[in-house]
Amino acid sequence: MNYKLLYKLLPFAFVAFISCSSPDKPANITDSTDISEPETIMEQPDTVLFWTVNIEQKEKTRVYKDTVAITDPKSIINGINAIYPSVRLEFVKLSGDTVYAHIDSSFTFANDIGSFGATEYIAGVVLNLTMLPGINYVNLDFPEGSHAAPGVFAKSSYAAYKEKDD
C-alpha cells in the first residue's frame, strides 16, 4: 500500500468531512424589509344566517353582523338548514350572479308548511344567498307542490323589505 499517497489525501478527506458535517447556516439576509409578514387568514364560519324574515311586515332582521366577508354559499345554506331542518336545502353550483340550489325534502316545503310558510322560506333563502358578493338570483329546484313552485328568484323582488332594528 502507498502510505505517502494516503497521507497526502488525508487532510483533504478531513476538510471534506468537517465541511459536510457542520450545522446548516441561516441564509444571508441583508435587509429585513424583504421578509413579508405572515398572512392573517380569516376563516369563514361554516354556518351563517344574515337575515330572518317577516313577510307580513315585509321586514328583515339582521342576524349576522360580523366583519368577515362571507363568500361561500354553503355557509349560508347551512344557516338556512339550521332554521328549517325539515326542509333540506342543498347547494348545487354557483354560476355568474346566480346560486343554484335544490330542496331535497320538498314535499314538506311545497305542501305542508302552507303558502305563507313557503313564501317566507323562499324570501329568507333569497335574501340570505343574495348577500354574497355579486349574487342577484337564486335558482331553486324542487318538485312543484300545492304551495310553491320552483324557479329563479331575484334579489330585486325583495328590495321593498325594510331592515328592522333589533
Image (cartoon, grey):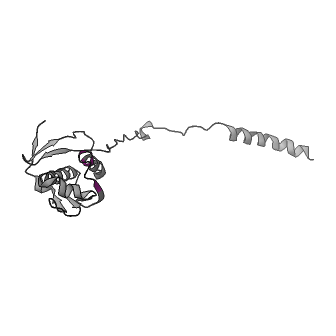
Q: Quadrant of residue 41?
A: top left
Residue 142 in picture, x, y percent from top left: 23, 62
Q: Which residue is drawn at 77% across and 39% down?
A: 14
Q: Going by the image, does 157 lie left or right of 97?
A: left
Looking at the rendering, which quadrant does residue 103 occupy? bottom left
Work out whether residue 135 can be spotted.
no
Percent across and percent down for residue 110 are: 19, 58
Q: In this view, does 130 lie above or below 49?
A: below
Q: Residue at x 84, y 43 (%)?
A: 8
Give x and y (percent) for residue 95: 27, 61
Residue 28 is a magenta residue: no
Q: Does the magenta stretch include residue 86?
A: yes
Residues rendered magenta in the picture: 80-90
The percent coordinates of residue 1 (x first, y second) are: 93, 47
Looking at this view, is 148 or 27 the one in front?
148
Quadrant that contains the C terminus: top left
